[in-house]
Amino acid sequence: MRKKKVNVGTIGLGRIGKIHAANIAWMPQANLISIAERKEAIDETRNFARNWGNLKITENYQEILNDREIDAVVISTPTDTHSQIIIEAARAGKHIFCEKPIDFTLARIDKALKAVKEAGVKFQVGFNRRFDPNFVQIKQAILDGKIGVPYSIHIVSRDPAPPSLDYIKVSGGIFIDMTIHDFDMARFLIDLEVKEIFAFGAVMIDPNIGKIGDIDTALTVLRFKNGAIGTIDNSRRAVYGYDQRVEVFGSGGVIAAENQTPCRTVLSDAEGIHSPKPLHFFTQRYQESYRREMEAFIDAIINDIQTPVAGSDGRAATVMALAAQKSYREQRIIKLSAAKGRDEKE
Amino acid sequence: MRKKKVNVGTIGLGRIGKIHAANIAWMPQANLISIAERKEAIDETRNFARNWGNLKITENYQEILNDREIDAVVISTPTDTHSQIIIEAARAGKHIFCEKPIDFTLARIDKALKAVKEAGVKFQVGFNRRFDPNFVQIKQAILDGKIGVPYSIHIVSRDPAPPSLDYIKVSGGIFIDMTIHDFDMARFLIDLEVKEIFAFGAVMIDPNIGKIGDIDTALTVLRFKNGAIGTIDNSRRAVYGYDQRVEVFGSGGVIAAENQTPCRTVLSDAEGIHSPKPLHFFTQRYQESYRREMEAFIDAIINDIQTPVAGSDGRAATVMALAAQKSYREQRIIKLSAAKGRDEKE
Amino acid sequence: MRKKKVNVGTIGLGRIGKIHAANIAWMPQANLISIAERKEAIDETRNFARNWGNLKITENYQEILNDREIDAVVISTPTDTHSQIIIEAARAGKHIFCEKPIDFTLARIDKALKAVKEAGVKFQVGFNRRFDPNFVQIKQAILDGKIGVPYSIHIVSRDPAPPSLDYIKVSGGIFIDMTIHDFDMARFLIDLEVKEIFAFGAVMIDPNIGKIGDIDTALTVLRFKNGAIGTIDNSRRAVYGYDQRVEVFGSGGVIAAENQTPCRTVLSDAEGIHSPKPLHFFTQRYQESYRREMEAFIDAIINDIQTPVAGSDGRAATVMALAAQKSYREQRIIKLSAAKGRDEKE
Amino acid sequence: MRKKKVNVGTIGLGRIGKIHAANIAWMPQANLISIAERKEAIDETRNFARNWGNLKITENYQEILNDREIDAVVISTPTDTHSQIIIEAARAGKHIFCEKPIDFTLARIDKALKAVKEAGVKFQVGFNRRFDPNFVQIKQAILDGKIGVPYSIHIVSRDPAPPSLDYIKVSGGIFIDMTIHDFDMARFLIDLEVKEIFAFGAVMIDPNIGKIGDIDTALTVLRFKNGAIGTIDNSRRAVYGYDQRVEVFGSGGVIAAENQTPCRTVLSDAEGIHSPKPLHFFTQRYQESYRREMEAFIDAIINDIQTPVAGSDGRAATVMALAAQKSYREQRIIKLSAAKGRDEKE
């Protein structure tokens, strides 16, 4: 017997919302039923959706939550709206895929995850990089014992260019907005919790980023429960493109993922040997990983299994991000339980 | 005003026919309307097509040719049926995309191309590799003068494993079936006609291939009109996977395309440094190029422009393949006009 | 007029002493005149030296210092003897090349450097890696503005296997013995002083290293005066060989040095793509750099110019090493002036 | 008991003669005793030799042959003098190392080798590339069965710039002067004789090379006794430097040697990813191989074993070169016995 398709409504149609909507639209196991987007972007939404038949388009995401046809929602709205929508969606009995971060504070994350738990719906956080073929390969090599016991992980994560200052203002800062992917990657690959975090930060690229209270360059050091060490090297601007590398060193060897490039050509001329820059940004580099994370979410619903990225994963990465921010501000090592405690008191 | 979509029927649903059908089905500018496949494979065809709505499925390709709704056909049937279907499709006024090679003989190719010309329909041959991002990049570098005047081209084209002996028997031999892609690539990149061909061949891999009159290893040398030299290194089996490399050397440098791999991980252990094998075979390696060639075909119809791969390109590659075969058999250099003449007399 | 050759005596003929002796012996601008080595190793010393004519071999390094024929000495004895020999050699008017580190304490380093200054002799510290063709290339690229303003440096420095426990006991610990090269490299390439240091350390490889009070895995973070950030990733054992990489990231790009290998062969087989491990250890990897640093020392004497690595460079690296050790022990950020103060009080 | 050192005289001190002389001078197992060079270059010779003690320098190579102290000679004179000197040296009982090619004609080679055989002295031809670490690694991989049965070999051998027209005039042509190294490499690696040769040639780089009857671009195809196929791609000018690559493909995989570079730095900037050009020319790239071939020659004398490159190897490569030249001129496949016959008649 053929399994039922999953009917999906997407809430928010920004850059990443569009990626998710398109992936669902092409997926044999899912139907894209409806899209909610704020009023100002409704025309653009209609234009975007016209190739996919008769979608319901609404300015009010609650219409999607009230729609009995809908099985699952994908939340790609601004971060400060996530927890409220999660709570409502959970109460409406919808399975939930939510972009990262779940929220800016642990208190609100915990409320949202409580609602999810009570409703018994599926929940997945958008840590898409776990599905990138390179990092999947690293994870598998570690599981297969190819590098023995992991001793350290080094993550380079640099954007080709900073986002707008308007975006940065509401982003929660570099650790919450950007490094959060790397915190999750470190946990995912090492498969242990982090007990201590230390962060150096600087404004090296654009003084305006400093003026609005954020930094553009950061080096975060992690200490895992077993003593293993992690480093995360972030920059808001690498002129040679999106630099996304991971290297895990262990007792049996080291495995590293180099950057993906649009092609594998090499030009040798009188000046030197030249090859192409990395894929420009996340829409190119992580195209495959966005597709695969959504397939995994739909698959978890169809087969009633656990989603591969849990709410607790989203929470843990946020704990790390808040600790890194605190470490950077207070210039001292932060023990992770302390970070958690502080936030819970608030 | 939005342009009309192109309605397409595909004829033949083997390995490559399926790739084309899926690409058309997902393409915003085209509608996949109908599929013709021989009786024995009708059930498999229905199963394959069930995700794409109400397709017309038929055992008789002439139903597609007679369907007024259809604008264009894609021919992926066995080679010996191509020219007949081309002639009928052209007379029915359908635009035509035909898999390579157009036919086994120049006489039949010429008849088919004559019908195409008389009907004034678009015609494109399936030299998909021209659309591979690596080779596109090489072509562009040459056009941009990055390597100056091309002196030589070296193509390595090795399959991971030989096809079935049954397939080989009707394939026309290695030069017609396999090297034909490389002949086209050489012409495409150097942008000159070839005046002389010389081929060494051998049975190194499977004696059974020799017993049915074919070879499994070949080295073909090309001499272009301006003296530039080409080599094509073919093998029916490379245990490390699909080896598809091109290198063009010129007065200003050399540009080479290395193999594409599924990811860019590198494992260093006590034994050495290890990285992944090339993408396994053409369905992975040339996935993108199949998609792009079909987009280009549909685009040529919509905008009424020339298709990027003409019937004359299909003919020229066949002339080269026949000359290589003759050179291998007679162990002498073949001048290209001679090869053409011989065939035309037959 | 042809310049006079420099007459050299070497003091200490361990692993690195042998490298220096051989380099001097083959050098056209220098004569290897005498070798001092402790009594137990005199026979081995005679054997080692027999190819280079009539060398004077002595158990008493003061014979070399008293030898009026000698222009310069090379000190490759255990670290705790360095400062005493430096002082005596300086007073004897000999130019001095001394292996790293100059000494274990800043007080003794300062005494030695004072003697050097008073004597007006040339002095060079054995930071050979500054002369490695890879790192020279990085330095030049930075000077040429190829990467713009440096934002961060990442150094990976892993040995293929730990030294003996006996060696580790007297080595001064990982930061003084091993990381000191990396501290110098960071200063050399970024060309700024470091103001803050933070270090995480662990015993991951051999519990016996922990039992004698040292660590085998370390991650040191540097903060340069202008805010730029450095990380140094050390391990006493990388099963895939000597891992010596440096990467400097800046406003205009990133330049990285990959590991040197004995050859550039690549084997593709049914298992994957395989290439050779890095050159096994420092005698292979830094062969060229040992030769070039000694040439530079001899050249500085002949042409009466500054040596390329000053006593102050040796001191600065030791300050960093002591600060890293303190940071690791006290688990807090150390400001560099504090580290200096503490040591001076002792 | 310590073995006696070998006393060597070198005859001819051009570019390669100097490399050999220096290697012998530094070698612990050999003494460089004397150098013969023509009158015009005697001053330069004295200058070159001054670092190596009291060498005997002569304008007359027969003085070396008559010197009873001399055990072996190294012949690096113009090719047309080789066979005469070989014959005289053999009769004088000296072991002989001779630069490639032995001579321009098989008749003279055969006379020289006959004299060697009658005298019972050691004889080695200067096919230094057999000692390059990369090609040694390929040879070993083949012997170890890493690529199974070799099916084909592809050699790229391009110089950074053509030699002077004066040199080319007396060089014997590209096949004798340049490709001869590649002919030897193909035989060395595949370890079978070649039965057929076919060559395409062209003047692409400098019309003046054509005017003096030579070519600057050549593609030579080899057919080994077992059917395996070889290609040799030569050019007198690659603007990106000395391109020296070999690739051997077999039933079990493929092994390739990429170019050696002066360092392993990679610069990523806004334009792309850049790495250094290959080592510029043979004095850099083959430095190690020149040293190792001479060590092997000295070693063969000391231990009275066969030299690793025999006179018959020098002859076989010349047979191939003459056949390639003939194939290029007559534009047909040459069977190797025919080439031999033709030459012997002359």
Image (cartoon, coloured by chain):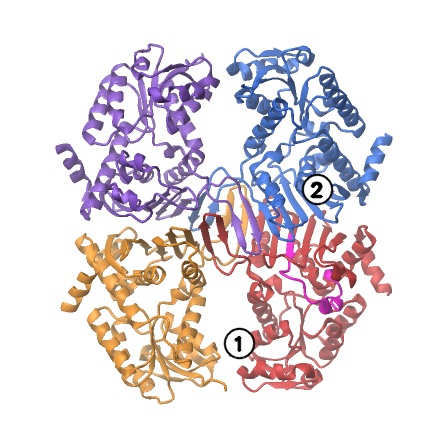
Chain colours: A red, B orange, C blue, D purple
Note whether residue D107 is visible: yes
Is A249 or A206 nearer to us in this picture? A206
Q: Are marks 1 and 2 in contact (CB under 8 Å)?
A: no
Is A137 or D174 nearer to us in this picture? D174
Q: Is residue B107 above or below residue B226?
A: below
| Amino acid marked by disc 1 | Trp
Label of residue C218 in the image: 2
Label of residue B132 in the image: none
Q: Which residue is mark 1?
A: A26
Q: Quadrant of residue D179?
A: top left
| Amino acid marked by disc 2 | Ala
Q: Which residues are magenta?
A: A155-175
Question: In percent of the image, x 15 and y 64: which residue is there?
Answer: B342
| Residue extending farthest left | D345
Q: Quadrant of residue D322?
A: top left
- Quadrant holding the C terminus of chain B: bottom left
> How far is mark 1 from mark 2, CA to CA?
48 Å
- Tell me where residue C37 appears, x and y as whole percent: 64, 16
Tell me the SS state at disc 1.
Answer: helix
Q: Quadrant of residue C75?
A: top right
Left or right of A5 in this view: B283: left
Tell me the SS state at disc 2.
Answer: strand
* Residue D168 covered by magenta stretch: no
Note whether residue D231 is visible: no
